[in-house]
Every structure is written in C-alpha cells, then in structure tokens.
Amino acid sequence: MTENKLSDRNIVVALSGGGFRASLFHLGVIRFLRDSRILHRVESISSISGGSITGAHCVLRWDELTGTEEQFLRVIDDFVAFAKADVRGRILRRWLLARCCVLPWLLRGYRFSLTGLLIDEYSSLYGISVLKDLEPKPGQLADRPRLYIGATSLTSGDLCCFDSEGLTVFHRGGEARIATGGALPLSLAVASSSAFPPLFPPVRIDNEVLRCDARLFPTAEWLTDGGVLDNLGLELCFAASPDSKASRLILVSNASGGADWRLDPSVRGPVNRNVRANDLLMERNSSILLEATATERMAVISLSTVVSANDGGMSPEVQRALRRIRTDLDAFSNEEIGGLIRQGYLAARVTLQRSGFAGELHDANHALDPAEGVKQVAFGAPPKTSERVRFRLWNSRDWCSWALAAVVLAWLLLGALAFRRFSSP
C-alpha cells in the first residue's frame, strides 16, 4: 500500500464562500480528509461566508469530528438539519412580523433586525459558544486547527479576521489592527462573515462589542460578507499565516460554480440578476487570486471539477446542476444536500490523488457513498428549481407564518374599519 504523502506535512485549508451550497460541498471534502486519514494534519482553516458556517461547526466539535464514525455522523447530521431549516426564510418572516407588530421593533430594534435575526439563527447551531471556545480544551483527543473567519470592512475596505483571540483588521499598507475579544459570540463572528450585502445590513463591531479599551479600537468597523474581497479564503490565509505559502500545503475547497452558460431567462428578475452579477464578480476575483498565488504546494478542490463515472461520479447533467444550485441560506432539499456532499467528497478524492498529495486511501474498500449513514441525506439529481432564489414568506410548519398572516389580516380589518368610519358622512 502506498504511504500517505501528507503524513509529514502541515496542512492549511481554505473554505470558500457560497451560502449553503459551499457549506455542504465543504462537508464532503472534510469527509474525504477524514477517510484518507489526513484530517488530523490540518493546522489551520481559513473560511469565508458559507465556508465559515461549516468551519465554525467543525472546529467547535473537532473532537467528535475526528472521533468514532458515530460521532462524526452526528456532527454531519446536525449540520444537515440546520441546512434544511430554511434559515433565510425564518429570518424574513420574523423580521416582517416584528415590523407588523411595531412594538417589538421599537423596543428591541437590533434584536429583530435582519442581522440580529441571522445571529440568532446561528446561535441555534453554535449555542452560546464564544470565540475562545475554538481553542483546544484540556483532555481533548485531537488538537483543533486554528480557525480564521474572514469578513470585509465596509468602513475601510480592509480584510478582517476573527479567531479565538478576537478581531484583526488587515490594513492594505501591511499594518494590522488587533483587538482582543475572545468573549465575542461565535454566532456574531460567523454572521459578520456571511452577511450577504443585498439582504443583510453590515454588523457593527466597536470596542464595546469587543469589550476592550477604546484606545485599542477607537473606530467602529461595519463588517459584511468576506466574499466581497476574498471569496476563496486565500488572501485571509496568507494574511493570518504569512508563512503558509512557503512552508505549508494549501488545500483550497472552492464551491464556486463557475461562469456557466444559461438557457433560461431567470436573470430577468432583480434578485436573480443581482445574485448572478455578484457571482460573476466573485468568480473573476477568485480566478485572478488563484493565478497570482498558485504554487506546487497548492491543490484546488473545485465544485466545477467533472468526476468521471470510473471515479464514482454522478452523471454530467447532475454535476452541472449542482454547480448551478443557488448560493443561499434557505431550505435545501435532500437531493441538493446529498449531491453536494457527494460531489465534495469525490472532487477531493480525484483532485488530491491526481495531484499526488493523498496517495492511496488507507481504507481502499471504503464505500463510495461519502455520507453513508447520514439519515437525512438522499442522493439524486437536484430539482430544476434549485438555482432560483425564492422569498419563502410562507411555511405552514412555522408558527411565525400563521402569526404574520393573523397580524396582516388584523391590520387590513383595522384599515377597512378606519376607511369606513372616515368616509361615512
């Protein structure tokens, strides 16, 4: 059996942005790293947007992730359930309900803002964890990799980074502004990294939020999606770990679907048109960054990699459909989830083996189904509507939908009564 060539290397992983499409693709890549016995060699993870959602979940539960198969699948199951929960739809419905009721919005405005609700949704995945919780715990079986969560400052246009110690702002002149803030909620850091600008307002970070002296952080930073500057996490990787390019093996998990051609008129709508334009800009920036930083010690595991049937790949039509799945945080179907996890696994397998980095799998007889045993996942072709962005203002299984309908009906009745009263002679 061929000796694993990564056994004597330090590895840094970059997880790209791209909503739940990216998050689920990265889960497949992580599954492959585990199966090939190299996950424990990961020294640091740089994550952006959707990659930050996955990275924070995995690093927070690293002991389980590198533990038994049952523990690993439990970590995956919990994330799959979160990806099926319609996060963005729940946020919109609660935001509308707060404004229709007026009082909650007036009394606790930020709590019921789009960004505040996003932080709350992430809290359902990360609990009350803070950045300091990302550090290794005493008695932990496996050392956690250092996690860098990337965001973009709308204040200065600089790249920002959360880690277990707090926040660092990397100024373009080469200087870095560091503020300790290990008590910052992990959900807030991930929200800062994934606050997609067309929908979510930026997250305000100041000395009060960081709980540090105003002299250390005199100017507030308004943070938005890290993909605005660096959708791959590569620039973040080099800024946070300057020696990565020279002395580490860099694995880039890139969930960009590429600038695929289209046959349908879906880009005529304002939402899909803006999302498409944003995707094209990020794709172009990512291509330029890859060309500028590519080395022999870098492997790019891409969603756009075509995996042949001989390598266990799905049909070309299914693989192309996966690349066109929306980059959103709404409810993903079993087919979408299963397909993306499987594609991440197989793309990692093909890319690393062809690059000569991974050698042969230690367990040569491991099943090709990368999410075998994950109860919520079913494999198959995603539906044709997978690329469409839907508002999802109604969900009969969400109490908030019924409450919102009742409040809207009450306002309509009050409006009708008021009109009748003032229009009568």
Image: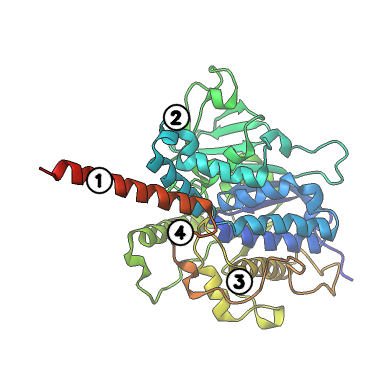
Q: Earlier in the sequence, mark 1 or mark 4?
A: 4
Between disc 1 and disc 4, the foreground one is 1
**Along the line of sight, which residue is nearer the eye, 270 or 406?**
406
> Around disc 4, counting alpha carbons within 10 Å, would you say few (fewer than 14), some (14 to 19), or many (20 or more)?
some
Residue 35 in percent (x, y) is at: 80, 64
Residue under the image location 65 percent in, 74 percent down: 379
Q: Which mark is residue 417?
A: 1
CA–CA distance in space, label 2 to label 4: 27 Å
Residue 177 in percent (x, y) is at: 56, 28
Residue at numbered disc 2: 107
Q: Hey, which quadrant is residue 161 in on the image? A: top right
Q: Using residue 224 as the reference point, say whether residue 234 is left or right of it.
A: right
Q: Which mark is residue 408?
A: none
Residue at numbered disc 4: 392
Q: Amino acid at mark 2?
A: Leu
Q: Quadrant of the N terminus?
A: bottom right
Which residue extends farthest front?
425
